[in-house]
Image (cartoon, rainbow, N blue to C red):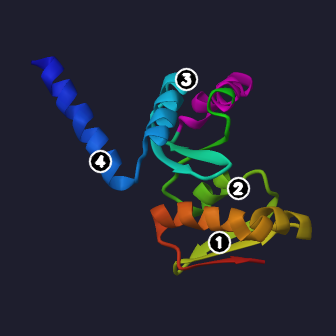
Amino acid sequence: MKNWAFCVKNLFLLIVVFIKMKLNLDLIHYINLFEKVTKTKFKDCFPSEERLIFVVNPGDCSRAIGKNAVNMKKLTSLINKKIKVVEYNDDPVKFINGFISSVKLKEITFENGELIIKANSLKDKGLLIGRGGKNIEEVKKIVDHYFKIKKIKIV
């Protein structure tokens, strides 16, 4: 009877994942690899041409990355794509700060559905925006998925 309940629970979780995001076989394969290698559960996965972004539950980020980034190196070699792991946070400012932690920022504010990011330098502003605006569009898509942002301003 316990096995039956376990199967029903897993089937329900799988249905929820299918409803939340459009999955193809490759993405399902990537998600399974991520969970097996990191031994953590993912909250969301956002694929793009060059990389996969996994959002994990609070407290699971360091475990997912592994000591000396061993899990990320292993996954990158298995998947042949760059991988980014972001820890989910209910506070949009903390979530965004964790998401774009590689760029030095002065301040991030979130008011009335508008996100204002103040970069330290022109170089950091360029890194944040990315070629053709692809980095900032990726940030907007992922952050909007959780917090419903109307507009992003980079100052």
In which image quadrant can residue 130 be found?
A: bottom right
Mark 2 or mark 1, which is nearer to you? 2
- Near mark 4 (Cα within 10 A), the count class, few <14, some 14-19 or many ≥20, is few
* Closest to the observer, 59 or 127: 127
Asked whether the viewer can see residue 120, the reply is yes
Mark 4 or mark 2, which is nearer to you? 4
Circle 2: residue type: Ile
Q: Is residue 37 left or right of residue 155?
A: left
Residue 109, labelled with which disc? 1
- The residue indicated by pointer 3 is 37
Cα distance between the residues tagged 3 and 4: 23 Å
Tell me where residue 119 appears, x and y as whole percent: 81, 68
Residue 41 vertical position relative to residue 97 in the rendered view, above or below: above
- Is tag 4's residue or tag 2's residue first in the polypeptide sequence? 4
Cα distance between the residues tagged 2 and 3: 24 Å
- Near mark 1 (Cα within 10 A), the count class, few <14, some 14-19 or many ≥20, is some
Mark 3–mark 1 contact, CB under 8 Å? no
Cα distance between the residues tagged 3 and 1: 35 Å
Give the structural element (helix, strand or loop) at label 2. loop
Q: Main secondary structure of the magenta part?
A: helix
- The residue indicated by pointer 2 is 100
Q: Quadrant of the N terminus?
A: top left
- Is tag 4's residue or tag 1's residue first in the polypeptide sequence? 4
- Is tag 3's residue or tag 4's residue first in the polypeptide sequence? 4
Residue projecting furthest to the left: 1
Tell me where residue 20 appears, x and y as whole percent: 36, 54
What are the residue bounds of the magenta stretch?
59-76
Asked whether the viewer can see residue 106, the reply is no
- The residue indicated by pointer 4 is 16
